[in-house]
Structure formats: structure tokens, C-alpha cells
Image: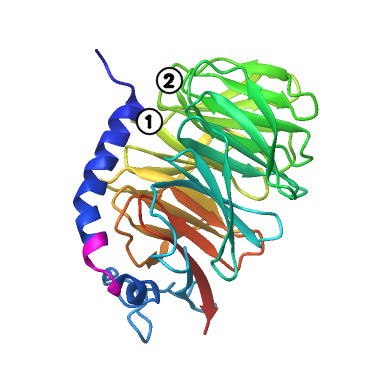
Amino acid sequence: MSRSPRSVFRSIEFIVLAIGVAVAWGVGNSAGSRAQGQAGSIPPASHATGAQGQPHAAAAHGGPVAHWKVRATLPKNLNAVRRVAIYYLAFSADSGTIATTSHDGTVRLWDAHSGELKTTLEGHMGEVWGVAFSPDGKTLATGSTDQTVRLWDLATHAEKGVFHGHSGEVWSVSYSPDGKTLASGSKDTTVILWDVASGKARHELRGHLGEISSVKFSPDGKTVASGSWDNNVMVWDAASGRLEKTLWGHRAAVTTVAFDPSGHEIASSSVDGSVRIWNLADSQDRLTLFKRDAPIASLSYSPRGRALAAGDLDGSVRLWNTATGDEIAELQKHTYPVHGLSYSPDGKTLAAGGGVEYVKLWSPVEK
């Protein structure tokens, strides 16, 4: 029997996890010292290095150099919370809360400043992958291998809605900027646009030939982008559900899509080890940021769009100048694949994590 591309991808992940878990459990208290920003991997020779060996960005066009340090970890106390595999993560609009999804069917909410666990949401009957905060910060949406999308009231922490419609696992969710529509992408190869108020499907977007790994609304809410294991990125009109364009170029499954803050460009990452930035005006990839042997698992634009962070399957996190394509920083390497990666809306934090390791919260320090 043939296996889906995501099954193969996850098999590779678990091999990495199996190799790394002995290290994670063997280091004991030294894990905390690593989290405090001591040197892990050595940056390439072209990179400068901070006073404690921390990698930082090379000055671009004579500008300031941004040193990065780990200011907190989730959980704050590694022995206080049972370790579970972390998949994706998201920041609330006010940058105060981080939601992480997990293989144990739960969603955890963390204080982004202190690293303390605030609460655990339970209700899904399978692994939880997709996660997104509503723009008003009142609701959290999650997607699961139980084939449902669930909405959670963040004031009461109670489940407030369950959307049924997919016939496969739900890997990704994304809110429209006005919070009225929710997009979900599934293993069943479809994207569904849901009316949040009624829970009914407005449009079912069909066109991909492989499971949907990532969905994102554009900043103006007029467009939805989807990345798939058919190697393609598709761009849809959110109002009509019409396919507007298909972006070809990746040679393997697309893992993540992200709009730049202007909405004029889309970044996509792939198992082929590349990240491409697409100009939506002409559907051309104006920049291929890099090509690596390790599959790229996650992407996040900085709030101003000047930098793009990428996390890969070998635990690396790199930052790239979106104008020039230059690598501007390589952060301390994680033990596990970096699925969860997100800049906070205020730009003060970059959260990165995955596997059974804690999430690291990085902050730039201008020198």
C-alpha cells in the first residue's frame, strides 16, 4: 500500500526524534543552561558572533546589528509539565499568549512573557496540528487528525463550536483579517472556507492533487493561498472561491505558505529544501532564498516583512533578508524539527519549537 507524502515526512521526523530523545532526557539540568543562550551550533564563517557565542545578523546597508538571545522557554520549568510532541504554534494579536498544538490531542496556552502555562484545552479526539487566533483575540481555532475544526472561547476556555466537513485530517487553519471567515486545509486535498458565525461552509476549494499542508489569508482578506503535497501553491479568490493562479517551481511537497505584510508576495517552503518568494503580479518566483538538504518545515515573516525566518527538519532556524536573499542570522540549533515558528505581532519575539523539546523564545537586542 502506498503511503501519503506527509506519512513519509513524519516517518523521517520520528527517526530524528528517536535519535534526539536520548540526548534530551540525558542532559538533565543542562537543558536549562542551553536554553539560556549558550552557544550550540557554530555559525558559518560569513556570520559574526556575539559575546557569548550567540549568532547574530550581519549589518545590512550600514544598519544596526541585531543580536539574538533566548529570553524564555516553554515550559518555563522543564520538569513541571509532561513533555509532549509540539507541532505548530501561534501568537495572539496582542503578543501576550502563545498557543501550541500537540500529538496528545491537546492545545496549550502559554504566557508569552513569563513562559508559564496558562491552561490546557481538551476536546479533540486525535492529534492537533493547525492553530490560529481570531483577530480580536477572543477565539482560538484548531484543526486535528479527527477531521474536525474546533473553536475555543479564550475567556472561558470552553469549546464553542465544531466544524464537520472534511473527510481527512485537518493540517492547517487561518482566519480572515475581519475574523468572519476561517480557512482550513486537509489531507482530503480540499480547502474549506467557513462562515465563523454559522459554522457552515461558504466554499469548498478543489484543485490540488495532494493533501493540503498550509493555508493562509492575505492581509486584506481578499485572497487565500494554499500549499500542497502536489508540489504547488494555489491562490484563490476568497469571495468567490475561484482559483486565480497556480505557482509552480518546487520539486517536492510544499510545507508552508506565508503572505508578506504587503500582501503582494507569497513565500513557500518545501521538502526540496528551498524557500521561494513569489511575486503575485506576474506569478514568478523572484527569489529562491536557499537550497538545503534538509526539508524546510516552517516560515514566518517579520511584522515589517524585511526578514523571513525558516525552520527545518534538522532543527535549524535561519533568518533571511527578503530584499536581497542574504542570510542574516542562524539561531542556536534545536534538537528536534522546527515545525512551530512565528514572529510575535509586535516583532519583539521569535518563537521556535517542535518535537518533544521546549519552545524557545528569541528576542533581538540592538547593538
Say which of 231 and 201 sits in front: 201
Asked if the stretch drawn in magenta spans residue 322, the answer is no
Q: CA distance from mark 2 to mark 1?
A: 9 Å
Is 182 placed above or below 24 here?
above
Say which of 32 and 319 sits in front: 32
Is 112 placed above or below 270 here?
below
* Rendering coords of residue 193 (x, y %): 68, 24
Say which of 132 and 294 sits in front: 132
CB atoms of marks 2 and 1 within 8 Å: yes
* Rendering coords of residue 349 (x, y %): 56, 66
Residue 169 visible in this rendered orientation of the protein: yes
Q: Residue at (25%, 61%) from the top-left corner?
A: 25
Q: Name the N-terminal-most of marks 2 and 1.
A: 2
Range shown magenta: 25-30
Report the quarter where the N terminus lies: top left
Circle 2 crowding by C-alpha within 10 Å: few under 14, some 14–19, many from 20 = many
Which residue corresponds to mark 2? 210
Q: Residue at (34%, 57%) from the top-left corner?
A: 316
Is 316 placed above or below 88 here?
below
Which residue corresponds to mark 1? 253
Asked if the stretch drawn in magenta spans residue 29, the answer is yes
* Residue type indicated by callout 2: Gly
Mark 1: secondary structure:
loop
Q: Residue at (75%, 47%) from the top-left corner?
A: 138
Residue 62 visible in this rendered orientation of the protein: no
Which of the 4 image quarters holds residue 230?
A: top left
Is 97 placed above or below 181 here?
below
